[in-house]
Image (cartoon, coloured by chain):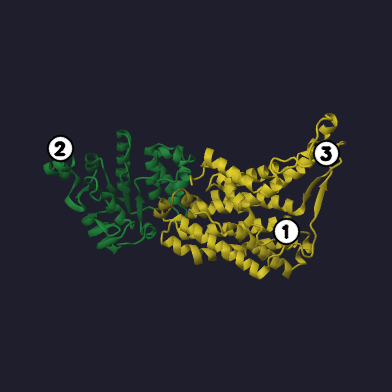
Amino acid sequence: MALIECKNIHAGYGGMNILNGVNMSIESSEIGVIVGPNGAGKSTTLKAIFGLLNVSEGSIELRGDNITNLSPDKLVHKGMGFVPQEHNVFISMTVEENLEMGAFIRRDDFSYMLERVYSFFPDLKDKRRQPAGELSGGQRQMVAMGRALMVEPSLLLLDEPTAGLSPLYMNEIFERVIAINESGVGVLMVEQNAKQALRIAHKGFVLAAGKNRFTDTGQNLLNDPEVAKSFLGG
Amino acid sequence: MNEFIFFFNSVVINGAVIGSIYAMGAIGVTLVFGILRFAHFAHADMMTLGAFLVLILTALFPAVGPAIGLPTAFVMMPLAMVATAFIAVGIDKLFYKKLRENNVKPVVMVMASVGVTLMLQGLIRFFAGTGTQSLYIDDRKAIFRIDLPFESASRNLVVTEPQLLLFLFLAFAVIALHLFLNKSRLGKAMRAMSDNPDLAKVSGINTNTVVGVTWIIAGALACAAGTLLSLDVTLKPDLSFMILLPIFAAAIVGGVGSPYGALAGGFVVGLTETLAVFNWTFVLRPLEQAIPALDLPNTLAFVPTEYKITIPFFILLAILIWRPTGLFKGKII
């Protein structure tokens, strides 16, 4: 059974649909990457999965369990973590407090999880008493991912985790994404840096105008001349 | 020396007293703003309401205070704080929650709170009348005159029991709030929601609980502020409404959304206000003997007492012009 499966979802803001039938499914051992031109509905897909906007048609299943249109806090309880693209840390709170807020729904002792997040992102351990607002963009992204990991999600949704980062940080973030995935967390992420992201993707979804244009393994998409020509800049 | 003591009694002590009241009110206003993003105009009348609940409890059990050596009203205050906290949560459920769920603009919430304030004023007058009442029923206000160990000092430092209780309670409340916001899970969630409400939601923070806790703290602090103010002066139905402007000024001076800023802002507004209406003639009188040409008028103040209310207004304008985020960098309004 797939970890997450979207069947023909239609969703949008107000009455206007941005997604017109998106299909995707990934396993918990996989990294799925959504790429496509601006306005294709990449971020909208993540938001629809995480209950941030209304799905008018189609269904979303988490391990066979229908989660269509559940609210974000219920989805966190069901084992989903979401990292928004912008404003994704509590800037006035320290790094460690940010992580604690990620664990808000947990009533057990989650200190081992703090240690695990620090082992994924060693940079953060030295800065754990520093307000997140004082960190660089890349470090903030790590805090944001760490926060989402605190509930030990089975699926992590990342909205453009490398947006605005230097190539050095971009590679580091991708390495961390691989490490997180290898620890047993399924990852579904939206990326602008399509080539680099598809290189680490088990599955790639090329969206255009709110629909799947191509769906294949990351490697096959990279090798597909048509995808390369239309979406990866030749 | 006597002049200095006079100055200390009338500016420093009185300024700190009214500053503490402003601070307590402003902390509530700032917390509500931080979480719910609107200026809660009914806060002042929640203060009056709390004080009236204390009056009722004091009238019911007038002998409790003398038995333990504290003003009865102060002993009854914790009970009334609990009641006011519940009323604040109830007001939210009844009036603000529906609006919030429909994502109305903040100005609609503000107008709703003006409506609530009018209702509270009406209710208070309906049940308690329009007259002045004292929270001292079976007991008397204790006044402490502290002798100073200076030969030239014939005057005493004067501080009353309710003023001392006010300072002690404010210190207690601020420390408790500080610990709550920085150490407890819910307190941190409150800061998180004030910092970034969308991220708080996607982190799984139950925003309804946070809103409830905010009203509990705001209601309890409002009741305490209203009661301690009424103990210091007297209880009138418009008592707190008259200080709504300085309370908002204090919250904005400190930086809206920052409880420490509200504390500092309260003292800035309170001390400035008291200093502005202070009559310098008494302090300067010794100079008259030294310089015979000097003819001091009977009152020599920066601002006549009747215009005291303009002071917070000017502080507010100055802050909004030169430092709109407030002293402690709150949210830009």
The residue singled out by tag 3 in the image is B2
Q: Position of residue A116 (x, y in %)?
A: 40, 46
Labels 1 and 3: the sequence-earlier one: 3
Chain B: give its colour.
yellow
Between residues B51 and A120, which one lies in front from this camera angle?
A: B51
Residue sitting at 81 percent across and 34 percent down?
B295
Chain coloured green: A
**Label 1 close to label 3 by CB (< 8 Å):** no
* Marks 1 and 3 belong to one chain: yes
* Three-letter amino acid code at the position of disc 1: Thr
Between residues B240 and B37, which one lies in front from this camera angle?
A: B240
Which chain is home to disc 1?
B
Image quadrant where residue B264 sits: top right
Between residues A204 and B288, which one lies in front from this camera angle?
A: B288
Q: Position of residue B332 (x, y in %)?
A: 48, 44
The residue singled out by tag 2 in the image is A234
The residue singled out by tag 1 in the image is B234
Residue sitting at 38 percent across and 42 percent down?
A142
* Marks 1 and 2 belong to one chain: no
